[in-house]
Amino acid sequence: MSKVYYKSADDIEQLRKSATVLSQLLGEIAREIRPGVTTLALDKLAYDYIHDHGGRPAFLNYNGFPNSLCISVNDQVVHGIPGNYELREGDIVSVDGGVELNTYISDSAYTFAVGEIGDDVKQLLRVTKESLELGIEQAVSGKRVGDIAYAVQEHVTQYGYGIVRELVGHGVGFKLHEKPEVPNYGKRGSGTKLETGLVICIEPMINMGKAGVKFWDDGWTVSTADGKPSAHYEHMVAIRKGVPDVLTTFSYIEEVLDKKN
């Protein structure tokens, strides 16, 4: 992971443009989430969409990653490689994407339900997304990374869920992964101080069961050690005084999902 990079006001506006393309892409992905669709078909959609909007997939060839999206199904936590797997009724699928637009890099993720899912899994998704929102509330100048981490941890542990510790959020913008690391567990008042110009990704990765994970032989995929489902949501946030500036949005996704329902 590279050093801490602080962004100017102009940098942040350029990042917002990249983030908008990514957010709109995830809205297009939402249209295609249904039983029978392969994860590779979703990846091709992303590749074409990003290029059609003047960008480059930030994940493609990053440290050798072979695709434009990380697509992780059910007990896969993150970094799943798209392939011939056909989505099935009752699956959950984390879609994590990145866009490089005019050298500025955005990063965001959303966990989708495929058709009808059980109430226990619905709760996992809801609580994980809520923990992201609570973490974002702490992402203002003068706070510390530990304040974000504690807010996520405090919310999800009351449900007995496991918080993945091997993987964390991160700085972003000029490079895909910058400092500081942004874990989903920690102590209030600890860690890197949040200052104006810092741009970070907050991304709770929460397991229905235990916190433990296993790393696959493909060198990328990470799944839960106990085989239970995992949820993952991610927003990109610019640190400002008083109010967090969330550069990515789930509004395009939610508009599509509202119409589907």
Image (tube, rainbow, N blue to C red):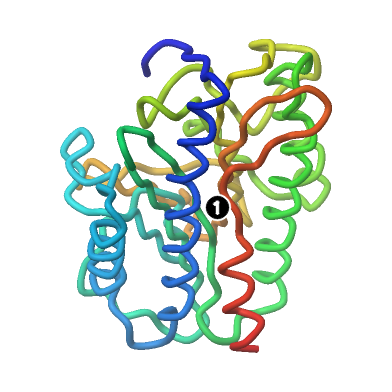
- Residue 83's place in the image compared with 53, above or below, is below
Q: Amino acid at mark 1?
A: His
- How many other residues sit within 10 Å of disc 1, few (<14), some (14-19) or many (≥20)? many
What residue is drawn where x is 74% and y is 56%?
127
Between 153 and 11, the residue placed more toward the observer is 11
Q: Position of residue 259 (x, y in %)?
A: 62, 87
Instruction: Name the residue at 22% across, 41% down.
Output: 219
Q: In the picture provided, is 48 more to the left or to the right than 230? A: left
Please identify the quadrant where the C terminus is shown: bottom right
Residue 41 percent across, percent down from the top left: 25, 74
Taking 225 as reference, is 239 left or right?
right
Compared with residue 26, is residue 202 higher up or lower down, i.e. above or below? above
Residue visible at 35% across and 26% down? 175
Q: Position of residue 258 (x, y in %)?
A: 66, 82
Give the residue at mark 1.
232
Above or below 105: residue 142? above
